[in-house]
Image (cartoon, rainbow, N blue to C red):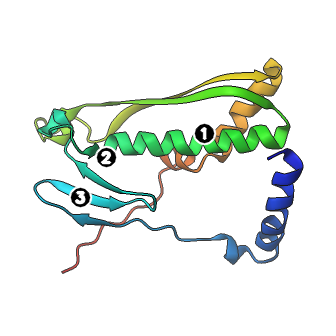
Amino acid sequence: MDAAELRALQAPLKEKYRADPATAVITLKAAGELGAGVTCNVETGQALVQAGLHPATGGTGMQACSGDMLLQALVACAGVTMRAVATSLGIAIKSGQVLAEGDLDFRGTLGVVKDAPVGFRDIRLRFVVDADATAEQLDTLLRLTERYCVVLQTLRNSPKVVALLSS
């Protein structure tokens, strides 16, 4: 896909959203079924993923760790966003990698100490890109990728999250 094809694909959507902003708000959904033992089966649309405890919390490592899945979602979103931005800017990326890593203190997750945080303390997102582009173009590519990556922006600007229990 080139820049003209991407613009042509997105132009009617942008016009629709300008004309009727309410149509731009879409609710994405995810669901899981509590599985055997300490697992949750999550339907991804492509496959069923069985999530379980990380080995640092007593898991076997045979199931997907939700922390890993969060980083994978960040990598996926950042990679797709970078490709879209590069296409829009006319930057030819020959090859590239998106790498994410995050630091967790499992003392918080396991309730070992009250002051240890639960969740990621730091996340690092790195791009390794081979492209025919100037340093200025690459700076713009990174800046716009950061700006438009949904998962990255959600992590940086946490939305209100409500948890409910139903029976």
Query: Residue 66 shows which numbered tag?
Result: 2
Mark 3 lies on a secondary structure that is strand
Going from N to C along the chain, the mark reached first, 3 or 2, is: 3
The structure residue drawn at horizontal position 22% and vertical position 78%, both measured from the top left corner, is 166
Q: Position of 133 compared to 45: left or right?
A: right
Query: Residue 79 shows which numbered tag?
Result: 1
Residue type (three-letter) at the residue carrying disc 2: Ser
Q: Residues within 10 Å of mark 3 (few under 14, many from 20)?
A: many
| Quadrant assignment for the C terminus | bottom left
Residue type (three-letter) at the residue carrying disc 1: Gly
Mark 2 lies on a secondary structure that is helix
Above or below residue 43? Residue 86 is above
Above or below residue 133? Residue 144 is below
The structure residue drawn at horizontal position 39% and vertical position 57%, both measured from the top left corner, is 47
Structural distance between the alpha carbons of marks 3 and 2: 10 Å
Q: From the image, tell me which residue sits under label 3.
A: 40
Structural distance between the alpha carbons of marks 2 and 1: 20 Å
Going from N to C along the chain, the mark reached first, 1 or 3, is: 3
* Residue 160: % across, % down: 44, 61
* Residue 164: % across, % down: 28, 71
Depth check, front residue: 102 or 94: 94
Q: Name the residue at the bottom extreme.
A: 167
Structural distance between the alpha carbons of marks 1 and 3: 27 Å
The structure residue drawn at horizontal position 83% and vertical position 19%, both measured from the top left corner, is 134
